[in-house]
Amino acid sequence: MLALLLLAVLIPTLCVVWFMSQAVGNERFAVRQRLIDAYQSQLEPLRARLQAEWQDRLTVLAGDPAAATTPGASGAAREFERLVRTGHWDSAIVRDPSGIPLYPAPVDIAMPDVVPFAAEDELWAIARQLEADVGDYGAAAETYADIAGRAANPQTTARALQAQVRCLLILGDRAAARAILRERLLTEPYRDTTDEAGRSIAASAAFLLLELSDTAPADPARQRANSLLHEILTDYQRTVVPSAQRLFLMEQLRATSPSEPEFPTFAAERLAASYISARSPTAVKPGLARTALPGIWSAVPPQGGSIGLIEEQRIRSDAAGLLAAAGMPAGATVELRPIDRTQPSQALVVLPVGEPLAEWELAVTLTGRDPFSTAADRRIATHIWLGVLVILTTCLIAAAVARYMGRQVRLTRLKNDLIATVSHELKTPLASIRALVDTLLERDGSNPRQSREYLELIARENARLSRLIDNFLTFSRMERNRHAFELTPCPPDRIVEAACASVRERFETAGCRFFVEVAPGLPDVVIDADAMITVLLNLLDNACKYTGQDKCVSLRAYAAQDDVCFEVRDNGIGLSRRAMRRIFDRFYQVDQSLSRRAGGCGLGLSIVQFIVHAHGGAIDVQSQPGRGSTFTVKLPAVRAAAGEVTA
Ligand code: ADP
């Protein structure tokens, strides 16, 4: 039965718990899905805008190839400056339509407008021989001066003067060298001249003059050299300065005069140079791609063109502005980030941007509590409360059913016990009475003494029957809670006397020594006299029944504090501790066969306890197996007005 009830509770509980966990899981999944859909629909237009923006940036890179290549390398430098100045790129590699880098170039490109040596060729040969083979620097310097004097174009003149300065410096004539630099090479006619390697002679001359001047920075010549050098280095339009020379000079100037303002293209030049030295810029795939430089991305338009270089951080921060303007729901951040295939994403929604940002994705990450998950939590809480309610209700119903069924089981058992006991207990005295009556009828009064003896036996069995029936009736009233007691103040000795009168004859017949002692001056007790006599009769009856051949029973009444005690003591078989705990239970008998033989039905002590408790009293038993038992009934000695208690 208990197992069934447990199952009845457990199965629905498990079902509810399973349903709850499923519901919670589904709810979370559904909310997450809704969240993903919502964010994804917001990401789509962002992706489109990013793609459009980056297409525009790439279009800028496509530029005008014709402009980049004409005239010569200066066009490429102009294009480089233009790309850097657009602000879209941190740096750029300007390439020709076939993908050959023009600016910055790994190998500086020879000037297409270099004037070939003509009449001076012979003199150049002599001067070079004097300088390189003979080591006559004085003669070489003079010859270079001669060439410079004769030369028809500034280019040749500038190269000759540069060579003359070189020889003069070897000779240690710094003053003469400085004079040439200051008065000739730094003047306007030579502003755009280049040496054989394509380097700007004016820039080299200005830098050399700065190095040679040990005068104060306020020196006008030095100042002029400085400003000319700055002008050349920042000028991408007119003067042709190869990137390597430009970067070198920029770095030198930064080192010598750190207080000077930064060259606007210095970072771009340096980045481009690093990129070129790190990998060949010819084979770059279209779109945005990682470079060999850490944190640097390259970009090439699909139709080919220049390479844009940009820092990863810049891509992110440029996109951050656009994404912030788009506005995301509170509790979520969206970012543009490179796709990382090495580890799983923590983001809620990830949307690859696609060309030209093929290696990039838009990622939405939850930062705090969003409205959707709050709603999900509310539903989950409802599910949980509902589940708890169902479980509680099931438990309550199960408890009520268990209680009801337990009661029913007890009642059924009680009824069965009652029927068994009643039929058995009534049968025995009735059978004896019938046998005695039959015998009497047969003998027909021939033996008056024996007839009297039989009649006395019949009377005793009759009395026993009456006691049994009285007990059954009391028990039945008790069970229906319908026992009404007529409580009246009564002197204890009157109860004792009545009980003694009832048992005296029986005790004598059974050969029982019986002592009665009532303390003098006992206060009255408020009792239902008949009920209390039943109590004493039951106790005296048991004392006589559960005692051996040598029966000795005493009944005492005495005062103890505010109580009056009735004590029934015997020298009988006694009770074990276990039995003492159970003797007041209905139908309990320590030794059933003995009790039955003695004419008991296991109801006497439960009736006693019921009556005593209904009087506000208590019953106590002291006993030891084989040494007899003492039952003490304590009743409050209250001289109160009579009342009626319905128990
Ligand atoms: P019963 O009608 O069987 O005597 P009771 O309720 O009066 O039923 O007693 C319950 C049981 O307690 C008895 O069956 C008996 O075993 C035990 N009992 C009662 N009184 C005594 C006693 N004075 N000495 C020993 N055993 C007793």
Image: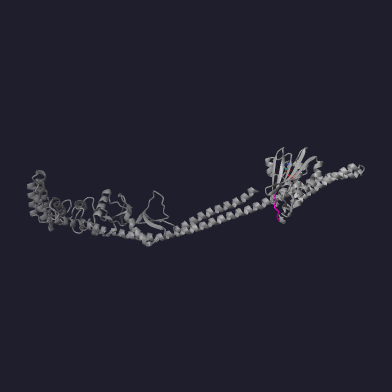
* Residue 59 to residue 606: above or below: below
Residue sitting nearer the eye, 263 or 92 = 263
Q: Is residue 529 left or right of residue 299?
A: right
Q: Which residues are magenta?
A: 635-640
Q: Residue at x 61, y 54 (%)?
A: 396
Scheme by which the image is coloured: one colour
Residue pushed farthest front?
Answer: 521
Residue sitting nearer the eye, 523 or 502 = 523
Q: Residue at x 57, y 52 (%)?
A: 15
Residue sitting nearer the eye, 270 or 307 = 270
- How many marks do you count on the picture? 0
Image quarter of the C terminus: bottom right
Q: Give the main secondary structure, helix, strand or loop, of the magenta stretch.
A: loop
Q: Is residue 121 in view from this perspective?
A: no
Residue sitting nearer the eye, 464 or 38 = 464
Can you give x and y, in whole percent of width and height, for residue 52 in the image? 34, 61
Ligand 1: give its quadrant.
top right
Residue pushed farthest right?
Answer: 446
* Residue 315 to residue 450: above or below: below
Q: Is residue 207 left or right of residue 431?
A: left
Can you give x and y, in whole percent of width and height, for residue 397 in the image? 62, 54
* Residue 638 highlighted magenta (yes or no): yes
Q: Quadrant of residue 511?
A: top right
Q: Is residue 369 left or right of residue 276?
A: right
* Residue 1 highlighted magenta (yes or no): no
Q: Is residue 314 in view from this perspective?
A: yes
Can you give x and y, in whole percent of width and height, for residue 422 in the image? 77, 48
Can you give x and y, in whole percent of width and height, for residue 217 in the image? 15, 54
